[in-house]
Image (spheres, rainbow, N blue to C red):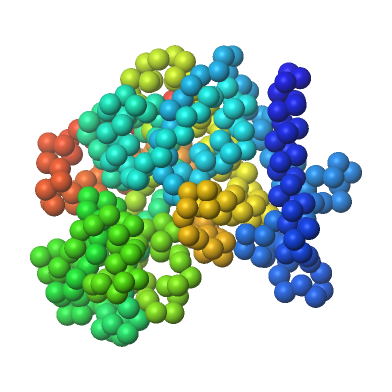
Amino acid sequence: MKQNNRKWMAILLAFTMVFVLASCSGTSQTGAGSPLSESAAPGSAPAASAAGDGLSSAENSLEEIMQSIEPLENPVKLRIGIGAGILHDFPAYLAEKLGLLEHAGIDANMLYFGNGPLMVEALTAGELDVAGYGIGGILGGSVTDVAKIVHIRMEEAVVQKYFVKADSAIAQFGLNPETGMYGNKETWAGKEVYVPPGTTLQYLLGAALEKMDMTMADIKPVFMDAKNVNTALYANQGDAWALWNMFGYAGELQNDYVEAFNGTTAGISLSAASVVRTEALNNPDLAAAAKKWLECQLAVIDWMQASEENMNISVDYFYEWTQEEGIMAEKEDLYRYMNDASFFNRNECLDLMTSADDEGVMTAMGMILNAMDFFVGEGNYRESDKAKITEEDFYVDFIKELQ
C-alpha cells in the first residue's frame, strides 16, 4: 500500500503541474478584465480551488476515481491496439498517461495502428490482446470471430464529414431541405470525390448518395488513405473530400470550405468499440487484465464528462497527445472535436448491449448491420459474411460486472 500511495502522490503532483504551469504562463487569469472564464475557455486549465487541501475539484474527483480501481493481484502484460489522435481511443490513452493502467496492475504495451482493419490483422496474428476501432474493424473482427466486442465506446457518425469548396456548385446550391445535405443530384453528378476505401467514410458516402437517389457510379470516386485525402484537399485536387476525426475540425476549413454532410445528417450510425481477442478471453490472466483495461476507460469517461472543468483539462491532454504523435492541431479545434460527440457511459453501453429493437435484434448489433449491408453491396463482404454477425460477437459480462 505504501508503494501505491507514493505512486498516486507522484501522479497527482504531475497533474497539479498542469494548473501551476498554466497559471505561471498568464493564460489562465480570470476576473472582470478577462474575456473568458476558465470554464469557458476551450482547452484552458482551471485554477486550483481554495479548498483546504489545495486541490481543485477536478483533481479531487480524479483522485477518487483512481482510488476506486482495485489493482490485480499480480501484474499482467497487455498488448493494446490504439490509433493516434483518434477521439474514441482517447480514454484508453489517458488511462495509460495518468497511470491508471499501471495502478490497476496492467503492464501496458501500447501499439499504434492506422486503422481498424490493420488491428484485426494483428489480432488474428496473435500480436494484440485488446484494441479499439470503428465500424471497419468491428465488421472484420466479427466476421472472422477473432475478437469480441466488450464495450460500445461512442457514436462517431458526426465526426465523419465531407467537405466541398465554398464557391463550388454544391455549396452554392445550399442545404437541400429534402436531404439535409448540401447540393443535389445534378450538382454532385460526375464530381471527383476523394475517399479512403473500405472505411466508415466510404460507407457514409454511399449512404449520402442513396439519399440523393445516386450510386457510386454517378460520381468519380478516387480512393486513397485518409491522410492523403487531407493532403489532396489542401492541394485543391478534386471536388469533394472525406475527412474524419480531427482532420474535419481544422481551423483552415472554416472560410474556404463547406461541410456538405456528416454521418448524422446522412442518417447513419457509426459505432466505435473496445474489443478483446477471443482467445484472450479464455486466458484467466488476460481476461482479468482486459476487464481492468475496460474499467479504467470507463472511469476516465465518467471523469471527463462530469464537468466542463474536467473536459477542458482533457483537451489539454488531447493536445499534448497530438503533439507527441506529430499531428498538427490547435486546442480550439480539438475542443470542438471533443464536444461534437460524446462517449457512452457504462449504463448507456449496457443498454445498447442488452436491449433489442421491435424485431428482437440487439440494439448494438443493429447499429452495425446497416453498414454491413453497404459493404456487401460494394463487394467488400458477402451475404454469408453478414450471417456471421450474431449476438455471440458481443461479450456482455464485463460491462454488466462494472455497473
Q: Is residue 120 left or right of residue 332?
A: left
Which residue is at a point 72% across and 21% down the rendered structure image?
3
| Residue 38 in the image: above or below residue 135 | below
Tell me: residue 235, above or below residue 350: below
Above or below, 220 against 13 in this view is below
Tell me the quarter of the image containing the C terminus. top right
- The image quadrant of residue 136 is top left
Left or right: where 52 falls relative to 388: right
Find residue 226 and report its horizontal and vertical position in percent.
31, 56
Question: Which corner quadrant holds the N terminus?
Answer: top right
Q: Position of residue 250 (x, y in %)?
A: 46, 66
Is residue 87 visible in the rendered image? The answer is no
At a point 22% along the width and 77% down the height, the residue shown is 184
Which one is nearer the viewer's eye here, 177 or 64?
Answer: 64
**Residue 32 percent across, percent down from the top left:** 82, 74
Q: In the image, is 213 to the left or to the right of 117?
A: left
Front one among 39 and 163: 163
Instruction: Residue 22: tell me if it is visible.
Output: yes
Q: Which residue occupies the extreme right position in the image?
A: 52
Residue 369 position by quadrant = top left
In this picture, residue 184 sits left or right of residue 87: left
* Count of all numbered marks drawn on residues in the image: 0
Find residue 313 and report its horizontal and vertical position in percent. Answer: 65, 52
